[in-house]
Amino acid sequence: MEGLESFRAQLKNLQNHAAILADALVSLSQSFEAEAELLTREYEVQQLKKIHTAVVKELEWSRYTETMRRYGHNKIRLTFSLAGLAAKFIAQATQNREAQCFANAALSTRKLNEPSYGTVMVCVGTKGIPDDVQVISISELARKSSQPEFKIIGELQKAGSLLFSQEAFTLLLDRLTIEIGEGRLHLPIAGNKLSERTATGYLILKSK
């Protein structure tokens, strides 16, 4: 009888130890999950920082490129205008009809037909962040298609893209960083989800 009681006591003791171990495993599992969640958040925040750095660099390069193209265009235009003035003086002095025609053509450039330069924006496509972010020169697309910039912007938006100035994109990433850090959001973030956030004032069509 004593042996049976001893066996029962040992069994009870083993059950208690098993319960303690089970609780410890649950606690350990929860700790691992919390650590994994924290590491995931940190990784995603770093992704956003890398995206921001890359986008800012590309914006700077695109603006520089646009400035150089504007400079080249203005230089050609100035040279053509000076040639037109010279031809005008020659035409007036010599009554040369060909020189007069050239002068009229060279001096009749209208500002309304001037190509646009300098409008560069961040474009986020339907796949969202981080997989569908790029810098787009609205001015270059307008020049290539011979369309005004507002039409290019409209076509991009119609296709589901979101357009941001550098300031607006920075504000958006700051907001996403906070939400990810608090565990309320995870990457990737589709374009339609970003639309909900930009509807509250983070979408700013402003060029630099």
Image: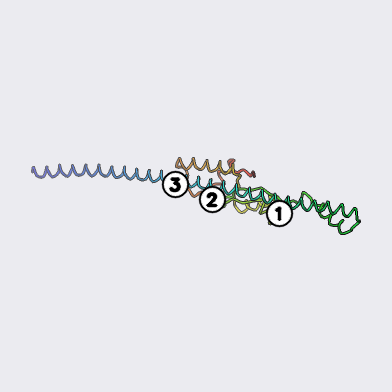
Q: Quadrant of the N terminus?
A: top left
Identify the residue at image location x=88%, y=55%: 91
170 sits to left or right of 146 = left
Q: To which quarter of the image does residue 96 belong?
A: bottom right
**Residue shown at 87% from the left, 59% from the top:** 98
Residue drawn at (37%, 45%) of the image: 33
Left or right: where does residue 186 sit relative to residue 33? right
The residue wearing badge 3 is 43
SS of the residue at dot 3?
Answer: helix
* Label 2 crowd bin: few (<14), some (14–19), many (20+), radius 10 Å: many
Image position of 127 with respect to 22: above or below: below
Q: Which of the two discs, 2 and 3, labels the residue nearer the N terminus?
A: 3
Pinpoint residue 153: horizontal percent, then vertical percent. 65, 50
- Whole-Å distance between the Cαs marked 3 and 1? 42 Å
Q: Amino acid at mark 1?
A: Gln
Q: Which residue is mark 1?
A: 147
Along the line of sight, the residue nearer the viewer: 120 or 200: 120
Label 2 element class: loop
> What's the distance in space between the residues labelled 2 and 1, CA to CA?
27 Å
**Which mark is in front, 2 or 1?**
1
Q: Nearer the viewer, residue 82 or 181?
A: 82
Badge 1 density bin: few <14, some 14–19, many ≥20, Cα 10 Å: some
The residue most toward the left is 1
Q: Earlier in the sequence, mark 2 or mark 1?
A: 2
185 horizontally vs 166: left or right: left
Q: Mark 2, mark 3: which one is toward the viewer? A: 3
